[in-house]
Amino acid sequence: VNASLVSSEWHRFKHGVWLAGGLASALVLLWSVTASEAGAVPSVIRSDPDALRLLRDAAAAVRSTPYEGTQFITTWSGSAATTSLIGVAHSPGKGTYTQVRRTTADPSGTTTYESDGDDSRGGLTGFTSKMLDLMARNYSIVHASEESVAGRSARVVEARRSDGSAAGRFWIDRASGLMLRRDLIDGQGRAVNITGFFDISIAEPRPQTRVVQTFATPWGHELTATDLGFLRNGDWTVPRALPGRLELYEARQAPQNTAVHLGYSDGLSAVSVFIQRGSLDKRRVAGWREVSRNGRTVYEHNALQRWTVWACEGYVYTVLADAPQGTADAVVAALPHGNVGFWGRLGRGLTRLGSRLNPFD
Amino acid sequence: VTHLGERITALVDGELNHDERDRALAHLATCGQCRAEADVQRRLKRRLRSLNEATPSSGLMTRLYAMGEPGGPIPPRARPMPGGVRPPFVARPGAGRPRDNRPPRTSLMRRRRVPRMRYLAVGAATLAVFGVGAAGFAAGADTGQLPRVGPAVEQFAVEHALTSGDVPVSDNDPAVSSQPSDGGPLPASKPAQHP
């Protein structure tokens, strides 16, 4: 009896040792994982809360303030620049008219109307609330100085890189809180894109008598994480991030399912990737510059925005970038190109077979 | 004269039906050649039947029975369990076991029996891998005729602008394309001048 008792106690002791060892191993594993994850998170970039609040308030002010004025957009591509003038008139609760003009006095371009709604911004902000979150994560938002824009006193807010250089600059109207101007600046300190008011009147706009050609609304079908998962399973390339700390912050599907729009941003630059199923109809890019990049033929059109179009393995990619040239080029290089090769085709086929056999797909 | 030929064998084996048998016997009554052939075959058959009845010698039977006798108990497999009681040592029996007088296994026999299943399994696995690979490669091909598409510039520009906080302006607008690309009309306060 004594022998069996001893044996039983011995077994209990051994069991306890195993249990304690296992628990200790699990704790060590947990600690190492959390420690490495904590190490992977970049250090929090310090921003001036008051400067950040000014930007948030500007997004709210542009929706609630009546104004009318002329905006300009200038985009540099290399040493050349393209400028456009746009008449803007916003009535809170109603909507915003924008009309492209040849000169400040010649309203000959297309008139676009965007009605005020949950998604509307009411004119120039240069960012959305989602982009502002990304901006606060990637840049240090600080007060810079005070300047005058379109004859109005404005507070300047800068988004600075970790090396202290300015990547974006915002002029906020001291009186109304409206965003009067936004500059996007590359790593060499050169302006990439400037959007701002040439003149502005903070008052209810005159009654509009223009014929509206385009009613601007974002594509209605917003793609969820599940939708994106299905797309990835079905060969679509949907990166979660792109070079230049660009994160996927918005994904939508065009009406009649003709294209998928993936919106990437680091808070300042905005890059849209449009993907269509099919082969490229070259008539649609007639007049665009045909160049070879990374061994493939792409079609470029640099004007107010940087456009790059190419076809690859049954998809047509269109990259539309409000970003420095280097970032735009890196995005194009990071997306699929050329022949997928034997292993690529095999992997794609196995993925297709798997999705066909999956009863839950 | 038509002889019975192969029907003699059938007659001897009793495989002819009633009518055929009668006709064959009637022919034998008149044809000496066929009768002689039938006699030869009957004798041959009797001889073969007698061969089947041969009994083995008693010595052979004794040796065969000895091979089938039960041996000793099979020793338990010694597999020590962690924390378990070690099984008692069992002496391997063999003293009372009859001598193994089966022909010794050759190395050829061993090689043939055991790995055959392994070869089969490897062959089946290889076939499966190649089959799945071929199916995957075939399924990975570009799917037929694709529609010809291109960027819907106006639509894409508006969608991009609305989701990124920009003013919805398309590059295709005639008023935009007519603008000079030398900097255009900029306000006096432009701080970031290009070099």
Image (cartoon, grey):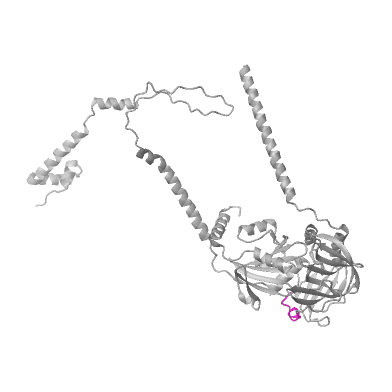
Q: Is residue B104 magenta?
A: no
Q: In the image shown, does B181 or A308 lie closer to the viewer? A: B181
Point out the image quarter for the C terminus of chain B. bottom right
Q: In the image shown, does A305 or B183 lie closer to the viewer? A: B183
Q: Is residue A185 above or below residue B180?
A: above
Please give the name of the residue rendered at 64% of the width and 59% of the height, measured from the top-left corner.
A231
Q: Is residue B3 above or below residue A141?
A: above
Please give the name of the residue rendered at 53% of the width and 63% of the height, measured from the top-left corner.
B141
Please give the name of the residue rendered at 50% of the width and 55% of the height, measured from the top-left corner.
B133
Q: Is residue A115 above or below residue B57?
A: below
Occupied quadrant, residue B156 = bottom right
Q: Which residues are magenta?
A: B169-180
**Where is residue A354 drawn, in percent x and y?**
56, 54
Count of numbered marks: 0
Magenta stretch prevailing secondary structure: loop
Query: In the displayed image of the protein, which residue is found farthest to the bottom?
Result: A106
On screen, residue A329 versus residue B91, left or right, reads: right
Q: Is residue A212 visible?
A: no
On screen, residue A36 versus residue B101, left or right, reads: right
**Where is residue A243 drawn, in percent x and y?**
70, 61
**Where is residue A207 drawn, in percent x and y?**
86, 77
Occupied quadrant, residue A208 = bottom right
**Where is residue A242 drawn, in percent x and y?**
69, 61
Q: Is residue A359 visible?
A: yes
Query: In the displayed image of the protein, which residue is found farthest to the top?
Result: A1
On screen, residue A140 versus residue B144, left or right, reads: right
